Amino acid sequence: MNTKTNTSSGCEACPVHLPGNLLKRGVDMENWDFVVALAGNPNTGKSTVFNALTGLRQHTGNWPGKTVARAEGGFEYGGKRYKLVDLPGTYSLLSTSEDEEIARDFLLFGRPDVTVVVVDASGLERNLNLALQVMEITDRVVICLNLMDEARRHGLKVDDRRLARDLGVLAIPTSARYGEGLDELVGAIEEVATGKVVCKPYRIEYLSGALKTAVTQLAAEVEARFPGLPNSRWVALRLLDGDARMRKVVQSGELGELARQVDIQMDIVGEPA
Amino acid sequence: MTRTPGADVLATATAMRWEFGGNLHEQLVEAIYADAARIAERAVTRPDQKPRFDLDRTIDRVVTSRILGFPIMLLALSVVLWLTVIGSNIPSDLIFALLVDTIYPFLKQIAAEVGLAPWIGGILIDGVYLATAWVVSVMLPPMAIFFPLFTLLEDFGYLPRVAFNLDRAFKKAGAHGKQSLSMAMGFGCNAAGVMSTRIIDSPRERLIAIITNNFALCNGRWPTQIVIAIIFVGALVPGYLAGAAVALAVMGTAVLGVLLTLLVSWALSRSVLKGEVSTFSLELPPYRPPRILQTLYTSVIDRTLHVLWRALIFAAPAGAVIWLISNVTFGGTSVAEYMINFLDPFGLLLGLNGVILVAYIVAIPANEIVIPTILMLTVLVSGLTGVGEGAGVMFQLNSEAATGAILRAGGWTLLTAISMMIFVLIHNPCSTTIFTTYKVTGSKRWTTVTALLPLFMGFLITFFVAQIWRLVIG
């Protein structure tokens, strides 16, 4: 078994290892090429990652629920401009509290080009609950395996490669507080944004028997009604769960707008080579 | 009937929902948890040896224990306040010596030499400059020491433990346990505290949290409390005890604020905002070694300079207003004197005086400038003409003694100081907080309640304190 987990000691030929062209743009978000959302459980260091990439100094606290509304900033990398949106920290996207709604609505309607899920490497299991839910909504996910320093302190070894393989998306180990792994993270964001890397995200196997048939059938109907929707299965599940907001956007056809816009966006970005 | 675009999809979904009933949500959550657990299990290897001594858990057992939790909280707060009081003396004196004893007479001299019209010099130098100089010398040192210390506690991860300790009390008061978090945010800034009540789902409990957030002493009011306590409480006890006495007085006010938060929450949840208490789980984040340099930087830039800048922006025009109302006269009496004389009887009923009430009216935009405003008004109105004539005798004293001398000349007593500290804690929120409340609640009615309830309570409490004080102590 390959137990080498530390990518930062990797070879210099790797494209991820050409750091140095990160340009922190602070609140300057003019003419962005890509939108990057930053999701994660509370207190995993999202705001620290946000500050490190944008050069802003949004106050970070060792404090769950610190970011209540969205914070936005910009950075430039590899000649492309990115708008970074720091979402409120949430444990799931399934309930109805306001912070969860802000996060979910942005992922669904804000159509970020890349969603970085910041997870706490020292509490992986709890954090993956959210990551799996995000991966139901969008394919273009990068896992930021943050707080590696804390995981080490607790004597944990986290195999980021195995995690990346199991999840089907890039997983980058970082210690954002000490600036470790951020170059690799920006590289991964670029690769997913520009389509150099295509994610094949793991989909939750929560369905059994009759329910599976029902979800598949309803998802097909959603797809027929709103062609091009990237997450019809998730929409179907939310409808079955009686999600009032989801019912509203299906009812009004807003969801269709969403699907069309996603299509246009896919044209601009182009198919991965 | 016209069918909306997604109506048929919704019809199918509704039909299916009959079939699967209520346990779909649980099934979904269980499946997600199971998958997350399986994937995490494969990626994480734990060392074979038994878990070593867990420092975090051990600290948590102590700081959140039923017996030691509260004493440790009070001790931590007193130490922070004591360090602030002890540490701010010397820089305060230095800044005061520079800005008021040296630059101020220099500016007056220049104004005299270039033949500046007296009223322009008055507005600019006696008004705008002196007000801002006072804000800097009185407010900057306590802020520059208090905020970094407070931020270090926050970064270390102590504040969630405070919230954890208070959670039981909030539940008993019929409020949401998360209100302890929004209150802790309020200790930084009430507008942020009100904003953070979004983490509370139930509208009833959120309103309780919004209305009572003002009882948490904010950034703007901590330094005011510290300054009043230094001048009056500190002067009463022997020098070596002064620091401790001041810290205790300020902490007493903060604790009074927490008690009022609980009391008002209790009263609201049993009267106009009745309802069930929701439960939630509060995660205690791991302790993290605070990053001292970064904390110093952010707390100096984000908090100290931010608060100071806000104070200066409001102090400059307020200084001009103060100078104008003190110097525009009708029949030999200035506008300020008319106002002060008019409000004096009412102020005295509350243990305060007319000057303080006028200062509150002038300082409505920002609580931070109340103390400098009071000083300016006292100097300009009470015939302490030393200021107007250049460097007067009293400015050769150090700044706190000078401030104390001005206030005592203005008729201040210990009762005035205590009433003032209570009133600083309990009065209407600042304009930013009121505006935020309106944005968050979307209700004019609840915004009005949030603004006026504490003001009314402040009048009531200071009134009773003053009456009882005069009966007992005289």
Image (cartoon, rainbow, N blue to C red):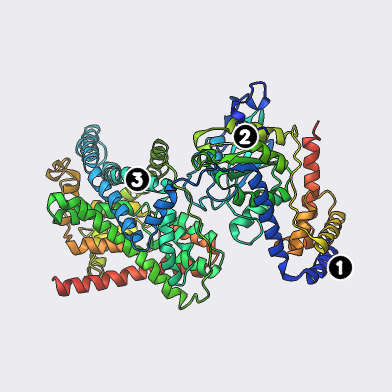
Task: Return the residue at label 2.
Answer: A185
**Callouts 2 and 3 on one subunit:** no
Q: Is residue A249 visible?
A: no
Q: Amino acid at mark 1?
A: Thr
Residue assigned mark 1? B2
On the image, which quarter does residue B96 sit in? Answer: top left
Chain ID, mark 3: B
Give the chain letter at badge 2: A
Residue A118 screen position, x and y as percent: 60, 44
Residue A163 as seen in the image, left or right of residue A258: left
| Residue drawn at point x = 66 percent, y = 44 percent | B42
Element under label 3? Answer: helix
Task: Give residue B149's mark.
Answer: 3
Horizontal side, residue A85 vs residue B387: left or right:
right
Q: Are marks 3 and 1 on the same chain?
A: yes
Position of A66 with respect to A91 (left or right) is left
Residue at (60, 59) in percent of width and height: A98
Q: Earlier in the sequence, mark 3 or mark 1?
A: 1
The tally of labels here is 3
Q: Amino acid at mark 2?
A: Leu
Q: Is residue A45 above or below residue B354?
A: above
Q: Tell me, for residue A148, which label it has, or none.
A: none
